[in-house]
Image (cartoon, grey):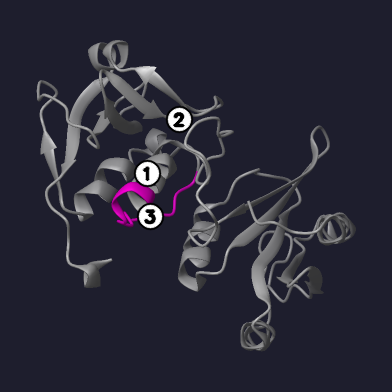
Amino acid sequence: MLDISPQCRDDLIAHARAEAPRESCGLVLGDDYAPCRNVADDPVRSFQIDAATILLARQSGRLRAVIHSHPDGPACPTRTDMAYQAEGEIPWGIVALSPVHGAELFFFGDGLPIAPYEGRVFRHGVADCYALVRDWYRREKALTLPLTPRDPGWWDIGQNVIEDNLGEFEFDALGPEAELEVGDVPLFQVAARVINHTGIYLGHGLILHHLGNRLSRVDVLGPWRQKFHRKTMRLRSMVEPGFL
């Protein structure tokens, strides 16, 4: 989570509400929120900030986050959000407006501090099973695993996000009968056509993982291995620094 002042938070949420049903957009500059004009062709469905505005903000050295709203959900980044955030590297914040839950603000991006492994509230694309694996490898092994932009429900349309991501890196696939080592990444298939869940093996029969709509936690691996385990990915070797 990006540490912003209460006033900044109030200002960007007020802007999101004022612009609805259009998507609001703006920038966090230091401790302040700077609202921007949405110049997208269809501001109800997307947002765009003038490139010159972004450039000036970067040059000022005060740019901390790019903000936009989801006036009608979802309360998670879309595939497009994830792609553009990763390309620009600056953290993004989204204000999700809901008649039931009100305004919900969250931030995402590798530039943010890594949250504690356990007790994370689930948010697809931000705090989910693959995000937890990426964060563990970033902190414990100083390796940044691939990030595939994805929409919720990717497993229902046959995408194989987790396995494909790890396959891009130096991971070997081991059969379900292989003896596990600390840092292994077991892959599970849970009520889906493809592998759709993963975690980190911690040793002593324990796995760190994050199920949908639950807090991230450490569990006994046994029941998961018996019912859902399909294969295990193991890092082959440390890669050259220039590859990261």
Asked which quadrant contains residue 241, the reply is bottom left
Image location (x, y in percent) of residue 23: 75, 61
Q: CA distance from mark 3 to mark 1?
A: 14 Å
Q: Which residues are magenta?
A: 139-151
- Mark 2 or mark 1: which is in front? 1
Dot 3 amino acid type:
Leu
The residue singled out by tag 1 in the image is 136
Seen from the viewer's position, the closer of residues 133 and 163 is 133
Tell me the element at label 3: loop
Q: Amino acid at mark 1?
A: Trp
> In the image, what residue occupies the spot 77% across and 63% down?
24
The residue wearing badge 3 is: 147
Q: Is residue 39 above or below residue 13?
A: below
Q: Quadrant of the C terminus?
A: bottom left
- The Cα–Cα distance between marks 3 and 2, rounded to whole angstroms, is 17 Å
**CB under 8 Å between callouts 3 and 1?**
no
Quick check: 231 left or right of 115? left
Q: Is 65 colored magenta in this rendering?
A: no
Local SS, label 2: loop
Residue 178 horizontal/vertical position (percent): 9, 25
Q: Secondary structure beneath disc 1?
A: helix
Q: Is residue 54 left or right of residue 169?
A: right
Q: Residue at x 31, y 16 (%)?
A: 224
Mark 2 and mark 1: span between their CA atoms? Answer: 12 Å
Please identify, in this view, whether the residue under mark 3 or under mark 2 is nearer the observer: 2
Which residue is label 2 attached to?
Answer: 210
Which of the two discs, 3 and 2, labels the residue nearer the N terminus?
A: 3
Magenta stretch, main secondary structure, is loop
Q: Is residue 221 visible?
A: yes
At 43% across and 54% down in the image, what residue appears? 149
Q: Disc 3 or 1, which lies upstream in sequence?
A: 1
Q: Amino acid at mark 2?
A: His
